[in-house]
Every structure is written in structure tokens, then in C-alpha cells.
Image (cartoon, rainbow, N blue to C red):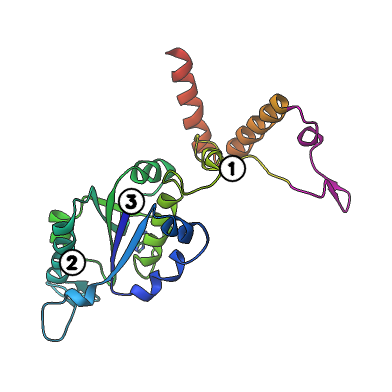
Amino acid sequence: MRIDIITVLPELLRSPFEHSILKRAQEKGLVEVVVHNLREYATNKQKSVDDYAFGGGAGMVMMIEPIAAAIEALQKERHYEEVIYLTPDGETLNQRMANTLSLQQNLIMLCGHYKGVDQRIRDHFVTKEISIGDYVLSGGELGAAVLADSIIRLVPGVLSDETSALTDTFQDDLLAPPVYTRPAAFRGWEVPPILLSGHQAKIEEWRMDQAMERTRTRRPDLFQQWNEQNQEESEN
Ligand code: ADE
């Protein structure tokens, strides 16, 4: 998979891809992340990438020419399944979207700034608009880093223990159950005895119960969804 990120702040996007799983994914050749400085595609002498909004009002708008030039230069090299614009008014990111995007070959992520990009970019170049949550960031860069992280760890071969992504929170629409490691007792706080029993079937049953209880109490919306889906499946 290849992810091209277009930004006015390339420095902001260096560190997230230089550590741990995301770094290893690139070293293994499973994923390539390329960050592009939008300013290099500026077409005027001042190398500007933003301008005043038509109709007035506070805040600058990202200009169409540099962004169009950047996207078209990339599209000339290869086919991209999605051109994603990171924006607080996009579709809210969830695990299902990350799963779907992890199956694609090439993705472009466009980071917005200021008051956002000229609407014509969204109308004619962008194929998907994604928000990472109902709050406003100072730019799309951290959103792109979050989105890329959620996708890359799902690319086959990236996680060494393949089952660990399958048991993540949200992966089967439930929150993950609690986990423990040694020591079995600390200041009198003990690990649930079932986990030390060696009885795998009973352990799985306990984990499922815990996952359901956690989801029911913390995320009743998810729990209802999960219940409805299970009911549908048992009827079919
Ligand atoms: N840019 C600004 N806020 C954002 C958000 N919540 N998600 C994605 N991109 C953004």
C-alpha cells in the first residue's frame, strides 16, 4: 500500500511514521508513506497556497491550483482508489472504514488548513471526506496521522501476531475485555482467577462476557448495534 499525504506542514507528519509499528511496516516494504509539501506545487511567484475568501469573512482559503497540481501529478504516476480530505465536517472515522481502506493499494490524503480548501477541490478531486471526531483541530495533519495509523496496522503482515488486530476493541463491534500480565497479585489486587486456570474455553467465555459488559456500560449505542446485528444473524 502507498499513502501520499499533501500538506503545508510536512514536518508535522515526520515523527508519527518513524517509530514502532508504522516504521516497521515501511521497513518491511508493506507500506510506503510519502509526504508532499504543497508549497512546492504553488504556481505563482510568491509560492502562496492560500488566499482571501470570496465574499469576505475572516480566515484564508486554500487555493485550488496548487492542490490540483499536486493531486494530478500523483495521479499521473498511478491509480488512487481514494482521494481523502481530512475535515471536521467529513464522515466520522470508525474501525469499519479503517478496515475497508486497509484493503486499497494507493491513497491520497489531503490536509486542510485555515478555513479549509476551495470547495471546487472537494467537488472535483476529493472522493472521500473523513473527520477523526467531533472537535476542530488546527489542521488535517494530525487527522491524517491518526487515519494512516488506523489503516496501516491492518495491512496484512504489518502486525506480527495476526490475531491481535482481530481481537482489538471495535473489531467485532464490541469493546475489548480487560487484560492482565504478571505479577498475578500486586498490593493484594489479584488477577481474575479464571485467567490463571488454563481452561481456554472458560477464558474465552469470560472475555466475551467482559467485552459485552464493558460495551453495555460504556457504549450503549454500540451495544445496541451489536445486539441488533446478532439478532439478525441468528434469524438468518
Ligand atoms: N481538521 C480539523 N479538524 C479535523 C477533524 N476533527 N478531523 C479531521 N480533520 C480535521
Q: Where, by quadrant of the figure, is residue 47 drawn?
A: bottom left
Rendered image: mark on residue 218: 1
Which residue lies most toward the front here? Answer: 28
Is 79 or 99 nearer to us in this picture? 79
Q: Secondary structure at mark 1?
A: helix
Q: How many marks overall?
A: 3
Residue type at numbered disc 2 = Ala
- The image position of residue 12, as x and y in percent, is 39, 73
* Tag 1: amino acid: Arg
**Mark 1 Cα shell of 10 Å, populated few (<14), some (14-19), many (≥20):** few
Q: Sequence-wise, which precedes: disc 1 or disc 3?
A: 3
Q: Which kind of residue does numbered mark 3 sit on?
A: Met
| Discs 1/3, front | 3
Q: Distance of mark 1 from mark 3, alpha carbons?
A: 35 Å
Q: CA distance from mark 3 to mark 2?
A: 19 Å
Q: Which residue is mark 3?
A: 1
Q: Earlier in the sequence, mark 3 or mark 2?
A: 3
SS type, badge 3: loop
* Residue 117 in sight in this render: yes
Q: Residue at x 72, y 25 (%)?
A: 202
Contact, CB < 8 Å: mark 1 with mark 3? no
Extreme residue toward the top, this view: 235
Provide the residue span drawn in magenta. 181-199
**Residue farthest to the bottom, as pictured:** 46
Residue under the point 79% across and 38% down: 192
- Left or right? Give the position of 86 relative to 25: left
Between residues 46 and 153, which one lies in front from this camera angle?
Answer: 153
Report if residue 134 is visible in the image: no
| Residue ID for mark 2 | 70
